[in-house]
Image: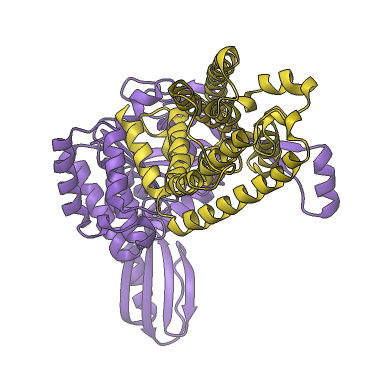
Amino acid sequence: MKNVTKTFRVAKRSAGFSKAVKALFQKEYTDIHALQDVTFTIKDGEMVGYIGPNGAGKSSTIKILSGVLTPDSGSCLVNGRIPWKDRVAHVKEIGVVFGQRSQLWWDVPVADSFELLRDIYKIDPEQYRKTLARLTELLDLGEIVRTPARQLSLGQRMRCEIAASLLHNPKILFLDEPTIGLDAVSKIAVRDFIKTLNREEKTTVILTTHDMQDIEALTERVLLIGKGRVLLDGTLAELKKRHGTYKILTVDYTGNAFAVPPAADLIENLPGHAVLSVNTVVLSVSQAVSAISSTVEVKDISVTGESIEETVLSLYKEFDI
Amino acid sequence: MRKYWSFFRIRFIAGLQYRAAALAGICTQFFWGTMTLLLYRAFYQNGGSAFPMTFPELSCYIWLQQASLGMFMAWSFDEDIFSGILSGGVSYELCRPADLYAMWFTKNMALRMSRTALRCLPILLVAAFLPEPFRLLPPPDLFCFLGFVVSLLLGFLVLVAFSMLVYISAFYTLSTSGVRILVVSVVEFFSGFVIPLPFFPEALQPFVRALPFASMQSTPFLVYSGNLSGGELAGAVGMQAVWLIVLLVFGRLWMAKTLKRVVVQGG
């Protein structure tokens, strides 16, 4: 994907009756730069997390990569093809899950939807049976494929959606918020499955999500996008290292309030309980602990790293997105 | 081809689920057909000799119209397609190795045919045993019947090709209710749904017959009863074929142009 730019024109008007009347005659448009000069390369078999706040351009990127949208400028090669020019050939080799939409037919059993997909993708019946059996086992679909989609729970439906996108054994799988709205058990089931798929089938997985645990559990590489630009491209460890220089110290103590070491910030301060954020570049954890224990009697102390959410949050802040 | 057939099948099956609606439809259409015929009967009894269709021809027209209402009704659209465009569900359809125009075309055919499948037989059967002159008579000869079959198929395809334009317009207007009201009234009026086209004023005839709407239900129904025959028949069926090609080509080009600038709604 190289220098891809996509702009949407969005009609804008302020609230209110008079403004609404005015908009009847003269519409004001604002250009939204969904993507500006986005460039990245993803290798075969890689698993990439694509993160960014709402409206950053994640879904637009997925839609361009899957051939649904045509960008204004820039080029993009997936498996040697330009997705939007060679759409039909391109989509045979990809699978897409849009977490917020459904590809299953609402009123008929899921199995019927699967069979329709089998025919649309011209999957060999033998191959189809094998794939379906494997997906049924891995995603625990057993009985639910015989139920109409409208009667499934969200977690069951999402498992079916993912299976539906994989029936034709795509080389690349795009997952646009696959765990949105799922409970913890279903999330873990979906994650485990994606991991297995990537490991055993060498399927390239590109995943957008707001759930940082998805990223932590699944991806090595992370692309951070904000306001239509790629801000960071690196491994999760690098990302953490960059921002994980802070450690969180939770201290329970007896006695009077203690002197806060200079390189630490007090996050929470209750009598007998304090939470500090320590910049480990300036002050190592052990130095901080000894500084604290020299002034008060420590009952309990725990050290945690910044969670990935906090890291990303601080990244969002840093890039002002 | 097989994938479109599967598409047809799943939509057809989904359409067959609404049995109560079909039963209600049969009753309504039977009632409607009877009322229409009684109304015309009153006109015919006051000097029917000047009318462009004989009363038995009209009976055939009305019963065929009621029986195939599911195929030709202008107001029936596939709501899935509209909601797909409106909510962005269309992105899944664009991720399939299939032609969107052909997919929607098949879906529409299947929906309309499933509605007709449940309703047409009871109506035709009852209408065939009604007393003269309200009875649905068999076509006068085999040639008429074959002409009817060909023309019915063409008329059906013309209608679906035309309704495709309404679906494509949804990419631009998002809310299609305005377009639909307009289209439905124009189609109903000029396709002979409200009044059979032969009843239109003489001066308007050439104009009305040249419109694509005349190539929908009017031609096959008139062919069936022998009202259109010989050169007129050939001309009308030829017109159907021309309109079908024009609408297909235009629809495909428009669709291709639209998809280049498509905006998927709803993030």
Q: Residue at x 40, y 30 (%)?
A: A40
* Viewer-closest of A36 and B178: B178
* Viewer-closest of A267 and B201: B201
Q: Residue at x 51, y 53 (%)?
A: B26
Q: Residue at x 76, y 29 (%)?
A: B50
Evaluate whether residue A207 shows in this view: no
Q: Residue B132 appears at what percent x and percent y? A: 57, 43
Chain B shade in the render: yellow
Q: Residue A222 appears at what percent x and percent y? A: 36, 42
Colour mapping used in the image? by chain
Q: Residue B155 appears at what percent x and percent y? A: 53, 27
Q: Which image quadrant: the N terminus of chain B? A: top left
Q: Residue B216 appears at what percent x and percent y? A: 58, 29
Q: Residue at x 43, y 69 (%)?
A: A276
Tell whether A297 sits left or right of A276: left
Q: Which chain is displayed in purple in the rendered image?
A: A
Count up the numbered dots: 0
Tell whether A159 sits left or right of B33: left
Picture layout, residue A24 above or below residue B27? above
Picture layout, residue B51 above or below residue A208? above
Evaluate whether residue B254 shows in this view: yes
**Residue A117: quarter of image:** top left
**Residue B113: quarter of image:** top left
